[in-house]
Image (cartoon, grey):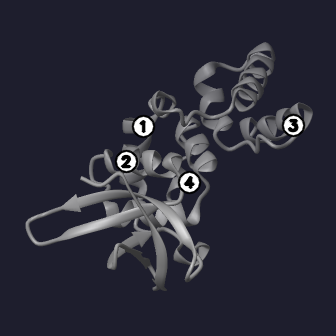
Amino acid sequence: MFDYIKGIITDIKNNSIVVENNKIGYLVYVSNPYSFEINEEYKVYIYQQITDDSNLLYGFKTLEEKNFFLKLISVKGLGCKMALPILAVGSIEGIMDAIERENILYLKKFPKIGDKLAKQIVLDLKGKLEIIGLGITDEVVETENELKEVLLGLGYKEKEIKPVLARININLSIEEQVKEALKLLLR
């Protein structure tokens, strides 16, 4: 089992790179091959998938990205070839936030992720991402808790609030978040 390969990038393809180390070129599937540069040296964190008919390497620029990939492929029905495009399209923080908020619509925007698999991702990963150091920031949690408290104070029930929280943009001020939440609750 490999942990990482340190070497020169000798080729970039549409979904992979070739990392040369000790005159051996390793074909490594990556989420964004164009973030690498030919003839530059990189430390590429590796996940090796061995099946009956293949031996594939998946690579990541950071250990955080690799750990998140490992969490994704632990989801029932989500394999390596489906998890890699998720990392290519979304930011780790955004995906984690969607999982914690049970934002199924956000998760369904990824290739080959339907309603059933999006719900499975939430079921399998919600509350488990902080174990590997991939939790959403304290600021996000504080903002969500503050919004929840305001809505509870206005007389809404927690079961009404929960689906709305997943649809609110956390980058807005708390006042704007309350306005957006009220619009959604009044529909």
The span from disc 4 to disc 2 (Cα, nearest Å) is 22 Å
- Secondary structure of residue under mark 1: helix
Which numbered circle lies on residue 113? none
Q: Which residue is mark 2?
A: 70
The residue drawn where x is 54% and y is 37% is: 134
Quarter of the C terminus within the rendering:
top right
The span from disc 1 to disc 4 (Cα, nearest Å) is 16 Å
Q: Mark 1, mark 3: which one is toward the viewer?
A: 1
The residue drawn where x is 59% and y is 59% is: 90
Q: Mark 2, mark 1: which one is toward the viewer?
A: 2
Under mark 4, the amino acid is Leu
Under mark 2, the amino acid is Leu
The span from disc 3 to disc 4 (Cα, nearest Å) is 21 Å
Closest to the observer, 70 or 7:
7
Under mark 3, the amino acid is Lys
Q: Which residue is mark 1?
A: 125
